[in-house]
Amino acid sequence: MKFTLSWLKTHLDTQASVDEICETLTDLGLEVEEVVNPADRLKSFTLGKVTHAEQHPDADRLRVCTVQTDEGSKQIVCGAPNARTGITIVLCKPGDYVPGIDTTLSVGKIRGVESHGMMASERELELSDEHDGIIELPSGEIGDKFVDWLAVNAPEKVDPVIEIAITPNRPDALGIRGIALDLAARGLGTLKPVETPTIEGSFASPIKVTIDEDTREDGCFVFAGRLIKGVSNGPSPEWLQQRLKAIGLRPISKLVDVTNFFTYDRNRPLHVFDAGKVQGDLRVHRAKAGDKIVGLDEKEYTLSDGQVVISDDKGVESIAGIMGGLETGCTEATTDVFLEAAYWDHIQIAMTGRALKINSDARYRNERGIDPAYNMQAMEDATAMILELCGGEASEVVVAGEVPDVSRAYKLDAARVQSLVGMDIPEAEQRRTLTALGFVLEGNMAQVPSWRPDVQGEADLVEEVARIASLTKLVGKPLKRVQDGVPKAILLPLQKREQAARRMAASLGYNECVTYSFVDQKSAALFGGGNDATMLANPISSEMSHMRPDLLVGLLQAAARNQARGFADLALFEVGPVFSGGEPGEQALQVSGLLVGKTGPKDVLGESRNVDLFDAKADAEAVLAAIGAPTRVQVLRDGPVWFHPGRHGRICLGPKKVLGIFGELHPKVLKEMGVKGPAVAFTIWPEEVPAARKKNTTQPALKASDLQAVERDFAFVVGTDVEALTLVNAAAGADKALIDDVRVFDEFIGGSLGEGKKSLAITVRLQPVGATLKDEDIEAVSAKIVEKVSKATGGELRS
Amino acid sequence: MDDLRDKYIAAIAAATDEATLEDLRVQAVGKKGEVSLQMRELGKMTPEERQVAGPKLNALKDEINSALGAKKAGLEDAALDERLRGEWLDVTLPSRLRGQGTVHPISQVTEEVTAIFADMGFGVAEGPRIDTDWYNFDALNIPSHHPARAEMDTFYMHRDEGDNRPPHVLRTHTSPVQIRTMEAEGAPLRIICPGGVYRADYDQTHTPMFHQVEGLAIDKDISMANLKWVLEEFFSAFFEVEGIKTRFRSSHFPFTEPGAEVDIQCSWVDGQLRIGEGDGWMEVLGSGMVHPKVLQAGGIDPDQWQGFAFGMGIDRIAMLKYGIPDLRAFFDSDLRWLRHYGFASLDVPTLHGGLSR
């Protein structure tokens, strides 16, 4: 919402400065977004008088002038044809910035003659395009500030333009009078009275208006109109054009400018039909699907069932409350005009406006809410202005429907301001504030003004009182602790897991990424997503069309971007939600890590090597340990297709409880995602990790035996498809009391073992409990281990 | 006997290797060594003679033995020194590589915010990123025709043909979590709701996903003055600057009544933002007293309970605190950015240890 200071002052009698007004507006909730004050760039210029002018000795077109200024007499060289003795000029001194030539002046020599400043033209000061000569002022004293002279003699040239942001609850401030009312209530001036003319019609309007039965509810409450005949349309007077131009509107013609004037002055959209082009009467009704109209913006709109329109005998002539039709629009040739003032259902306006994608001033105001009680007076006010500007003769007013009764009152509980806001404002002041805003107080009931649709309860009265008093006066008051003493822990188990997983991954050398939750369909599909359930209806680009099914999508895209920047070796991770469907709750928390390239750059120790799945497995195990997952897990195959089919494992507690997965990514997936391998990854689902069973903090007592542990190595020859974990579990099961640990320390394939065979070597650690082990004890357990392993794997002890 | 002593002590001192020492040991105190042979002679002596010669011989044996031991240790030390002299390494060579991981600023700042509010008794509530339009809008007093809906740049989820429910939305703020938590826990209540939110906007200062933290406190007698105190405490703790002032300005949000925009005190010195000093103000959050209709939507009786709510951008306060210039870079995963603006894994923000290093 834009307005000028001078326009505001037509409603508000105030001495306040622009700065003061702007600060107050922002404080009142009408946040100032921009102030353009033309005076700011003219501040330094003063008036001077040319007391002597003579020909420049070396230039035909230049004159050397003696100018009297507030700093005494100065010599100025000037090329303007009108530079002559006796005129009052606008002086720019050395050091001044001259906006029209984008230059800061200094003392100069022009063809050998010193010049101490310049005398400005209007164009040089950006006041107009006038550049035939320098400004000659008809009045003013030497040393006067030019801006002061303008303020008195041409105020429109230094009229500050203020733009404020309007929150949806304040349609009243979409009219300049509403803004003035707020400022007056704050005490920044007094509201000027408005005239309330009544124009008696001298004849019956030949155009009648009706509202269809089905359109009265949720459509049009009241539709008033009248014919004004014999008008002469044409360009508006200068003052009206100036005002509209200053706030960025294009003056069109007197009739149209009048409607725009009321739109901004009183938040009152109106419409004018060229009565000569209206056939028959006007009817407010609901459109049928497929009805068409060309709007004033010269675009064709196709209407849907139920949208409210105004039609004459020819068809639809106006989209009610949103935009008039081109067909019946007023032109310079209009002589008879039909003026409309109506009050529409704001929801209906919002829906239609949104459906047709029309963003007009009328829609903007009608959907936020205009003052219904002003409807009939608006008709009179606009008629008076049209008669004044265009002449003509007004008919009687025709009305369909009724002005709705929006009266309501809420109890003013003076103590509520203290209890809700925490400000101490005397009751008398509260009542004064509300009264100044247009509320009518009867006892402690406050009747809400008809232009404030936002006030819907007692809390709104508190808001108004606090707002006008200024929230800057609010003084903080400590919030009591929920209970005295040491604060309780507040994180939920899953939240703690999330933090632990994140910090563990970072400790392992991964860099945390936060990537967008939406990815492109093709990439999503590679990871089991990309279906319609997870699709956005209105993505901002096809790269962000589907909710991600897996964090690896975003991480691989990040890896590809980093590889393009020249970083080949990467360790990236993310913690965040992934989406299995489009319903609330169809999301799960994931922790994913991605390793690409080598373990590090080549190094003197020769340790740099390609990342492999055991890196990913180690990291998955570390993250799982950090979030308290059980250590005894199964590692199963047959995970999702984006992993290498033979080189991945699911970390499970039983076949259906998957805690995580690790492995090499499928080469085809890497290719599709544009990542140069090798690449391995892990994913953890923290929600799947069972909650800790422990209820207290006590640890079981440490059972450490003083007896010497014994380690024995075994090597078994087994089939290449036998998994190490099977062998380890079999060995460990040989004597659960005695065997403390079983570790694989070597895998050897091929050689003398022959096709399809491999050797797996394990170390078994025996921890005696009761007595030191004798050789025969060790022999016995060894035999059992060999037997168990052979049974489980079909292998035999390597000879 | 003195000759014997002088001979061997001198020979031991002159020895330069262990083999020579061993020879000397055998010659002197070995089974057939000179000293041992003399000791055998003791049996042939008179008791008187023996009383004199015995201790002398024993002392001589001890002396030679200890001289041998000392010399042996000395030779070993010299040999070790000699070996170590050859074991020089260039210690300026790079160390064994260990990856330097980092924590993203959004995660770090979320933990900082959590630490501060936890101390004031606020729990952390979370909710779904895809939510119904009821939770995201209606329950927050934003009915379908409300202009605020259109202004939110909402992302909608696809609806299959024939599914006539209103489309779900990607939450445009974390406020739906307020409603869900009110429903689940009732009053009194103190929570913050941090998390990702979405709006269909992408330019220099907007990304289609960003992060918010919302605060909600509901009790019998909570006022806006408490809100101001809580926020000032928060900002001082968060920015680690004593006594940051806030300025409340009236504003409007459908879910608050009254509502206020909150500015924090700041100044610009040589193009550098300084928070908590000077007389400039910068808008950082929206807040207000929870609208009675919102309490009702959450199943809380507005005649019994009241409270405040506020919401601010996590990414934004991260940018302000850590001087990060561009929001878009938060989501670009540029390794250089992650390393530069990320945090070490052990930099866990706590109130007792300080939020930042």
Image (spheres, rainbow, N blue to C red):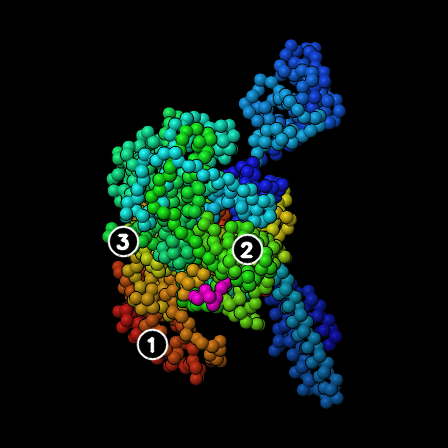
**Mark seen at residue B164:** 3
Residue B73 in the image: x percent, y percent?
64, 68
Q: Do pointers 3 and 2 mark residues of a single chain?
A: no
Name the quadrant containing residue A231: top left
Q: Measured along the vertical axis of the image, is residue A245 above or below residue A417?
A: above
Q: Position of residue A422 (x, y in %)?
A: 57, 61
Q: Is residue B9 left or right of residue A215?
A: right
Looking at numbered disc 1 in the image, what kind of residue is underneath it? Ala
Residues B31 and A213: in front is A213
Chain letter of disc 1 in the image: A
Residue topped by disc 1: A734
Between residue A134 and residue A111, name the one nearer to us: A134
Kindly identify which residue carries mark 2: A465
Disc 1 secondary structure class: loop
User: Marks 2 and 1, Cα distance to the nearest angstrom?
Assistant: 83 Å
User: Does residue A334 show up magenta in the picture?
Assistant: no
Check contact, mark 1 vs mark 3: CB within 8 A. no
Q: Nearer the viewer, mark 2 or mark 1?
A: 2
Quarter of the image where one finds residue A738: bottom left
Give me the C-alpha separation between circle 1 and circle 3.
Answer: 63 Å
Q: Disc 3 residue type?
A: Asn
Frontmost residue, A73 versus A282: A282
- Is B307 included in the stretch rendered in magenta? yes
Front-lying residue, A384 or B333: A384
B93 up-or-down from A336: above or below:
below
Instruction: Say which chain tag 3 marks.
Output: B
Q: Is residue A795 above or below residue A5?
A: below
Seen at 26% across and 51% down, the residue is B160
Residue A607 visible? The answer is no
Residue drawn at the location 30% of the way across and 66% of the way down: A656
Q: Which stretch did the figure color magenta? A: B300-310
Quadrant containing the C terminus of chain A in the rendered view? bottom left
